[in-house]
């Protein structure tokens, strides 16, 4: 009971303070007057636009050369591109006709070099794929991008991959596998 009397008294006090704060109409008149003065004192600054530059056409001085949009220029570009495509296609043709080796089924990032040795006077790399160890040497194929091993050292093996670039052309790309230190 006593609690409700205190709550009622507190609510009435807040209402009285709120009404006392709203009663000052002279403050609002001062605020309106200040806003009117500020609005009248503000003047926009508009910069004039610069004069447009005069266009002066230039004469074409390449009359004797091939026009950039002529059929002759297009024929030259197509001939150059077809020669490039033929050269790039020569990269992949022998790769498609040979039988794939076992290690070409795994992507190159799944292959780990874990050691090397000399066998028959030639360096041999030991690689691990799916917890199986394989011996590879220069000339073997590795990875899914027609990767052919070009060099085996004690700490790495180098290979040449044949991949397609963004335009769909076949290009050579070098890749290297480094020896994994402390492998189990």
Image (spheres, grey):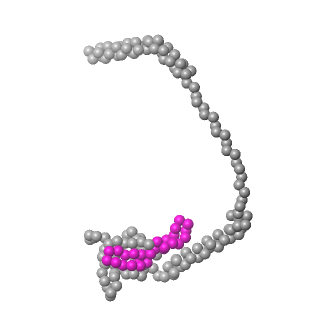
Question: Which residues lie in the magenta part?
Answer: 147-173
Across and down, in percent, residue 182 comes to 26, 70
Position of 108 compared to 114: left or right? right
Across and down, in percent, residue 19 comes to 41, 13
Magenta stretch: dominant SS? strand
Residue 128 visible in the current orientation: no
Residue 99 visible in the current orientation: yes
Quadrant in which the N terminus is drawn: top left
Magenta run includes residue 43: no
Q: Nearer the viewer, residue 87 or 146?
A: 87
Count the numbered circles shown. 0
Quadrant in which the C terminus is drawn: bottom left
Q: Residue at x 38, y 12 (%)?
A: 16
Q: Where is 124 relative to 6, above or below?
A: below
Position of 164 compared to 156: left or right? right
Q: Residue at x 68, y 64 (%)?
A: 68
Q: Nearer the viewer, residue 169 or 142?
A: 169
Magenta run includes residue 152: yes
Q: Residue 159's quadrant in the figure?
A: bottom left
């Amino acid at each position: 009971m006593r609690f409700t009397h205190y709550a009622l008294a507190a609510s009435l006090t807040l209402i009285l303070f709120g009404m006392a704060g709203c009663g000052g109409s002279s403050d609002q008149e001062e605020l309106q007057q200040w806003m009117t003065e500020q609005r009248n004192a503000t003047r926009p600054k508009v910069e004039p636009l610069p004069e447009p530059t005069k266009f002066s056409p230039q004469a074409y001085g390449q009359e004797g050369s091939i026009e950039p949009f002529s059929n002759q220029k297009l024929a030259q570009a197509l001939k150059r591109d077809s020669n490039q495509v033929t050269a790039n296609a020569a990269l992949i043709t022998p790769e498609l006709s040979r039988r794939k080796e076992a290690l070409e089924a795994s992507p190159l990032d799944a292959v780990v070099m874990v050691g090397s040795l000399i066998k028959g006077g030639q360096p041999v790399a030991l690689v691990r794929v799916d917890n199986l160890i394989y011996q590879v040497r220069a000339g073997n194929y590795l990875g899914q991008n027609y990767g052919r091993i070009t060099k085996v050292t004690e700490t790495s093996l180098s290979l040449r991959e044949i991949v397609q670039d963004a335009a769909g052309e076949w290009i050579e790309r070098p890749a290297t596998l480094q020896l994994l230190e402390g492998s189990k």
